[in-house]
Image: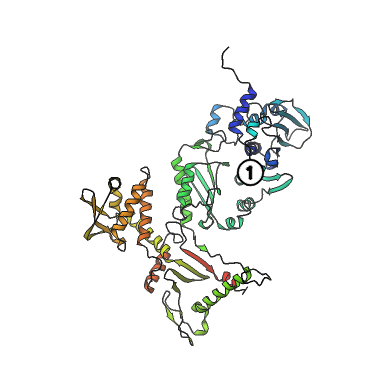
Amino acid sequence: MGQIRVLDQNMINMIAAGEVIERPASVVKELVENSIDAGATKITLTVEDGGRKLISITDNGCGMDTDDLAQAFEPHTTSKIKASSDLLGISTLGFRGEALASIASIAQVRAVSRTKDSTSANCVEIDCGNKTGVGPCSADYGTTVQIRDIFYKLPARRKFLKTANTEMGHITEQFTRIALANENLDLTLIRNGKELYRLSDKDDLRRRITELFPISSSDISENLIKAESGEKGLHVHALMGKPLISRTNNRFQYVFLNGRFIRDKFISHAIKEAYRGLLEPGRFPVVFLFLRMSFEDYDVNVHPTKIEVRFYNSNLVHSQILGALREKLLGTNLEMPAKLPEMQHTQSTSRHSPMVRDSRIADAMAEFFRKHRPAQMQQQLGFRPSAPGKVHAVSRENSAQYDRKYLQIHDSFIVAQTEDGFIIIDQHALHERIMYEDLCRRIRKNKLQSQRLLIPESFEVTVSEAEALKANAELTDKLGIELVPFGPRTMAIQAFPTLLSGVQPLDFVQDLIDLLDRKDAGLDAERLLDEVLNMAACKAAIKAGQKLTESEIDQLLADRQNAESASRCPHGRPTTIKFSISDLEKQFKRT
C-alpha cells in the first residue's frame, strides 16, 4: 500500500486551527469580528477561567436562519465573499471562512441565532467536529456562540496555554483593540461573573481610552493631541501622546485601518520618525492612529490572523502619516509641566513622615520665592516696568537683592518669569535645539560656511575609517569640513565650519569618524546627516556650568521664541519645565 493518504475533513480543520486559533484570545477576536460584520451594535463577552472553560459572545446582529446556521461551521463557508473579484476589495473583518470550522474542531460549541423577522431561534451544537442537527429554541434576535473547554481533546495544545490571568490579559487586549476601533459599539466584558468593562456607544474616543486604560488614564487623557489630514485618498486621524507620557515599550501604539487593528513596519517607522528628536532613546510614544482608505488600495489576505496588510503604495502611506503627525507635533507647545509634591494631610508628626517632608520642601520653596519674588508682585517697592529682559535694581532696607525677569542658577539653569508663573530652562538643552535647527536651515540651503585653519590638524586613520570617510565624502563636504591625505595613514583637517568655532576640530572629526564607521551601510543619507547634526549641535552648544552674561541670556530667550520646537533637545530631553502660580499657591496652602 502507498504511504500517502487523504486526511479527513475534521483533521484538516484541526490543523487549520493551529494557524487561526492560537489561544482563547484568538477565538474572541474571530467571534467578535463576526458579530461586527453582522451589523451588531451591542456585544457582550463573557469569559471564565481565562477562556479555557468558557467563552461566550452575545450580539444583536442580523442573526442566521436555519440553513445559514447549518452551513456556518463547515470549512470555507462565508457570506463575506462570493467571487474571486471580491478579494480585491475586502470590506469586512472576516472573510476566509476558516474561523468557525477551526473553533468547532477543537472545542465544544453551542450556537443560537435568530433573525429579526423570525418568530423563533435555532440552535446547533458541535463537539470537536461532531455536529448535531439544527433545532428550534427560544432566544432574542441576534446570535450567541458559546465555546467550552478549548483544546480539551488536544492535550498537546492545551498544555501550552498559560495561566488564567495571562490568557485573560490577551483577551482583554483583543477587547481593547475592538473597542478602540468601534466607538459606535456598546461593549461589555464579564470575567468569572464580574463585570470588567461596560463601554457605552455614546462615549467619545477620549472617554473610551480613559475607561480602557484606568491606571494611566490621568496621564493619557489629559495629554493627547489630535491630528487629522486627508490627502490622496488617505484619511489620517490620530490622538498622539505628548512626549512626557512616553513609554518604555510600544504597548500604547494602536493602528487601525478601516476599523481593523494592524501592524505594519512602514507605519511604525513613520510614527518613530514623527517623534524623532522629541523623545529620549529607548522611549516609545503613545499613539492611537486611525486610517481610512479605499479597500482596493491594500490587501489583507496575506496572513491567517489578518493582522498584517500589504499596501499597494506603502511610500504614500508612510509620507502621509509622517507629515500629518510631525506637522502637528512641531506646531504644539510641548513644554513639560512641573510635578510638585502633593500636600498630604496626616496626623503623623514623624521627622521622616510624608507630611513633614512635604512641609520642609514647601518651606524651602517659600523662602526661595520670597527672596526672588517677581518685580510686579512687589508694587510697594515702587518698581516701574521698562524694556523687557533688562535687569532692574530695586532698593531694599538691609538688603542687596535684585529683581529680574530671569536669573541663572548654578550656571546651568535659567529661571524666567511668564505671565502665569515661571519656567526653568536647561541652558545646554535649549541651546542645543537652537543650534540644531540653525544647522538644519543652513545645510538645506547650501553647505556650511567654513574657514581654513592656520595650522592643519593631522590624525591617523585605520583602513575601515579611511573607507568610511571616502564613502561619506559628500557629507563631510556639506558640513564644511575639508580633509586631505597627509601621509600613508594620515589625514589632515584643512578647513572647519565657522558655526562650530567653539568646537575642537580634531575632537569633532574623530567623533564623526566613529559615527560613520559604526553605521550600517544601508542607512539612508538623510538620517545619517541628521545624526551628525545632532552631534554637532551638542558639541557647539553652551554647557552646563557655563556662566552666561545678561546679553547672552537675552539672546538665548529670544532665540527660544523663534525656534520651531523649543520644548525638546534633538535627543528628546526636555528643555523647559513650566510652573504655574496656581500650582505654587496650592503648595503654600493659599487656596
Q: Residues within 10 Å of mark 1 (few under 14, many from 20)?
A: few
Amino acid type for the residue under numbered disc 1: Thr
x, y percent for residue 343: 62, 69
Decide: is 126 above or below 564. above
Q: Along the line of sight, which residue is nearer the eye, 481 or 53?
A: 53
Q: Residue at x 71, y 28 (%)?
A: 127
Q: Along the line of sight, which residue is nearer the eye, 231 or 426?
A: 426
x, y percent for residue 511: 33, 54
Q: Residue at x 49, y 79 (%)?
A: 375
Tell me where residue 29 sits by quadrant: top right
* Left or right position of 553 against 77: left
Q: Residue at x 46, y 85 (%)?
A: 395
Decide: is 226 above or below 175. below
* Quarter the N terminus occupies: top right
Q: Residue furthest front?
A: 351
Decide: is 297 above or below 72. below
Decide: is 547 above or below 110. below
Q: Residue at x 55, y 71 (%)?
A: 581
x, y percent for residue 195: 72, 47
Q: Is residue 298 visible?
A: yes
x, y percent for residue 538: 38, 59
Tell me where residue 110 sits by quadrant: top right
Q: Secondary structure at mark 1?
A: helix
Q: Along the line of sight, which residue is nearer the eye, 398 or 77?
A: 398
Q: Residue furthest right?
A: 138
* Quarter the C terminus occupies: bottom right
Q: Please name the colour scheme applied to the rendered image.
A: rainbow
- Which residue does the numbered mark 1 point to in the structure image? 166
Q: Residue furthest top?
A: 1
